[in-house]
Amino acid sequence: MTETATRLNDVDIAAVGHLFEGIRADESKAQTTWAAHVQWNGAFASQARVRNFSPIASDEPTALGGGDTAPNPVEQLLGALGNCLAVGYAANATLAGIELKDLRIDLKGDLDLSVFLGLAEGHAGFTSITAKVTIDSDAPQEKLDELHARVKASSPVGHTLGNAVPVDIVLN
């Protein structure tokens, strides 16, 4: 078992506990703003800068006219959902005392390019997204089911995708 007095699932239990208690004591600490800055690099290539990290490249596959040098935006969106779910499973499992031996999330989304290409009007985004979660743990299935329900109920990216969220795109 990877559990020690301060870590479970390689998560710093004290750090998560301090965050939890800090927000419990002052709800205003829960309100956060996140940002990304995108630079177009020609053709269908661009890159996003987030905080002080290396740029995150984006491009389209050659079948869509791109150079296929990086994942495209909809693939990155699926990855963002999967990464958000992984954080949710790690955090909630740790808080519940559940050791995760392995966690895998396979995502697929269905998208009709007709609207994007201007051939039709309507919804240009995914018509459905499926995330299949595989957890390897010695925890009883009942505990894993509770964990799964908590993660589904609290995923910021999952909730953003699953609910109508105002998006304001402004031309400067």
Image (cartoon, rainbow, N blue to C red):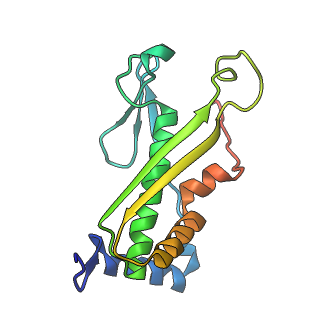
In which quadrant of the rendered view does residue 54 lie?
A: top left
Residue pictured at 61% horizontal, 31% vertical: 111
Residue pictured at 34% horizontal, 77% vertical: 15
Left or right placement of residue 104 versus residue 35 in this view = left
> Is 81 rendered above or below residue 101?
above
Q: Position of residue 84 (x, y in %)?
A: 46, 56
Looking at this view, is 95 or 56 the one in front?
95
Residue pictured at 68% horizontal, 41% vertical: 168
In which quadrant of the rendered view does residue 69 lie?
A: top left
Left or right placement of residue 163 versus residue 158 in this view = right
In which quadrant of the rendered view does residue 5 lie?
A: bottom left
Left or right placement of residue 111 versus residue 166 in this view = left
Q: Position of residue 61 (x, y in %)?
A: 44, 21
Q: Position of residue 169 (x, y in %)?
A: 65, 36
Looking at this view, is 19 or 5 the one in front?
5
> Is 140 rendered above or below residue 57?
below
> Is 138 rendered above or below residue 39?
below
Q: Quadrant of the N terminus?
A: bottom left
Looking at this view, is 58 or 82 the one in front?
82
Residue pictured at 57% horizontal, 55% vertical: 158
Q: Position of residue 67 (x, y in %)?
A: 39, 16
Q: Quadrant of the C terminus?
A: top right
